[in-house]
Structure formats: structure tokens, C-alpha cells
Image: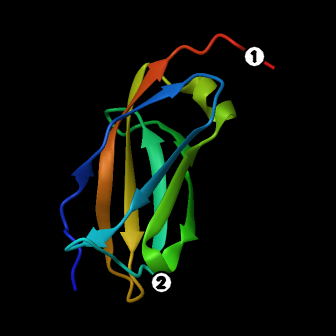
Amino acid sequence: MTLPSLPVQKNFVYQRRADLVVQFGFKYQNSTVNMTGYTAIGSVWDFDRTTKYQDLVMTWPDQANGVLQMKLEHGGTLSLPAECPYDIMLIDPFGLRRYYIEGILYESEGYSTP
């Protein structure tokens, strides 16, 4: 079974000073995909890809059922511009690297602070 090789476009709105946590579920023909052995990496850049703002925290809450979690931590949101691209690369157990998810993060100003 092969997952699609072209990146899926997913844009998100993050709020400054708050964590953004998003879960993705990998499915094929309505069935979950076992992603055991896969590694996920993600990062946020400027549009020219000259400035890397931060790495995304990537975890597998349920790797056997294809559940991947992306986290943009609240401290990192302070240095991001109003719009910035991100992407997520998956590395399969054999070392094949593919971009599966990419998009733009849009800022929404958060006002409450602890």
C-alpha cells in the first residue's frame, strides 16, 4: 500500500501566545494506515526559505492507527510573522523521504496572557 506522494494542502490559524495542536489521521480506502516505523519532521519557514522560524513538535499518539500530532508551541508563536509556510516530511522505515502535508500558518492575535 502506498500513500499519496504529493503534499496535501492544510492551512491553519494559530493564536499568538497559545499552543496550536493538530492531529492528522492517515487513511487509505476508509481504513487506518499503520505508520509504525515512520518518522515525522516539520518546520516553519519564511516564504523565501531563508529563515527557519522553528521546528514543529511531531509525535505519534497512535502510530499503529496512523495518528500523527503536530504542535506549534506558544513561545515560538511570538516570533512568527502574520503568515508563514510550514511542511511535514515523513521518512518511511526504508529511509524514503516524502512531503505529505504543507500549508500556511495564519496569525490571530491572542490577547489573554497568564
Q: Is residue 59 left or right of residue 44?
A: right
Query: How many badges with numbers are in the image?
Result: 2
Residue at mark 1: 113
x and y percent of residue 81 in the render?
47, 21
Q: Residue at x 54, y 13 (%)?
A: 109
Query: In the image, is residue 14 above or below residue 86?
Result: above
The image quarter containing residue 77 is top right
Query: In the image, is residue 100 above or below residue 14?
Result: below
Display colour scheme? rainbow
Q: Secondary structure at mark 1?
A: loop
Q: Is residue 74 left or right of residue 66?
A: right
Front residue of 35 and 94: 35
Mark 2: few, some, or many residues within 10 Å (few <14, many ≥20)?
some
Q: Is residue 23 left or right of residue 19?
A: left
- Mark 2 or mark 1: whose residue is earlier in sequence: 2
Q: What amino acid type is highlighted by mark number 2? A: Thr
Residue at mark 2: 36
Q: What amino acid type is highlighted by mark number 1? A: Thr
Q: Residue at x 42, y 87 (%)?
A: 93
Quarter of the N terminus within the rendering: bottom left
Mark 1: few, some, or many residues within 10 Å (few <14, many ≥20)?
few
View extreme (front): residue: 30
Q: Is residue 53 left or right of residue 19?
A: left
x and y percent of residue 10 in the render?
30, 43
x and y percent of residue 8 in the render?
24, 53
**Separation (CA) of disc 2 from disc 1:** 38 Å
Q: Residue at x 39, y 63 (%)?
A: 25
